[in-house]
Image (cartoon, helix red, strand yellow):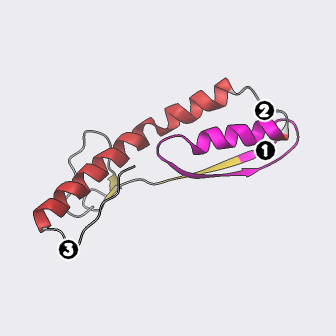
Amino acid sequence: MSLIQSIGPPPERHADRIIGEMMRKLAHDRAQLWDGVAKVFYSSGWSGGVRAQRRMAQRMADIPGVAGAHLSEGKRGRFTIILYDQTDWNPSTNSEIRVGDPIPEKP
């Protein structure tokens, strides 16, 4: 992860370029999110024990695009993992920004 430092407000053109790059990165990560979740889920088995459930939740939290994961532990295969992610929104089309879509002026 890189650190962006600025003494004052950045020039408008530079800020627009950086925001565009960030939006493309988020859209790319979001597009690959569910493939990563499925890969972790199916490679982990059915995670009967609490330790296995915790490991699965941690691996899901480490997937690019996942902002956080919350595990509600349960008995043998009866558990819930809630994943939090961030998506980009295009207000002019009222839809999610996907990979390959042009980045809107005001996302």
CA neighbours of label 1 inside 10 A, class few (<14), some (14 to 19), many (20+): some
Residue 4, magenta (yes or no) = no
Q: Do the residues labelled 2 and 3 touch (CB within 8 Å)?
A: no
Q: Are marks 1 and 3 in contact (CB under 8 Å)?
A: no
Q: Which of marks 1 and 3 is nearer the N terminus?
A: 3
Report how far apart the C-alphas of labels 2 and 3 lie in the structure. 49 Å
Q: Please tell me which residue is depicted at 17% across the width and 55% down the height of the picture.
A: 17
Q: Are marks 1 and 2 in contact (CB under 8 Å)?
A: yes
- Give the number of the mark in front: 1 or 3: 3
Residue beneath disc 2: 47
What numbered label is drawn on residue 45?
none
Residue beneath disc 1: 79
Residue 44 quadrant? top right
Q: What residue type is labelled 2?
A: Ser
Percent coordinates x, y for residue 6 in the rendering: 25, 68
Report how far apart the C-alphas of labels 1 and 2 lie in the structure. 9 Å
Element at label 2:
loop
Q: Earlier in the sequence, mark 2 or mark 3?
A: 3
Residue 9 quadrant? bottom left
Q: Start and end of the magenta stretch?
A: 51-80
Observer-nearest residue: 100 or 94?
Answer: 100
Q: What residue type is labelled 1?
A: Phe
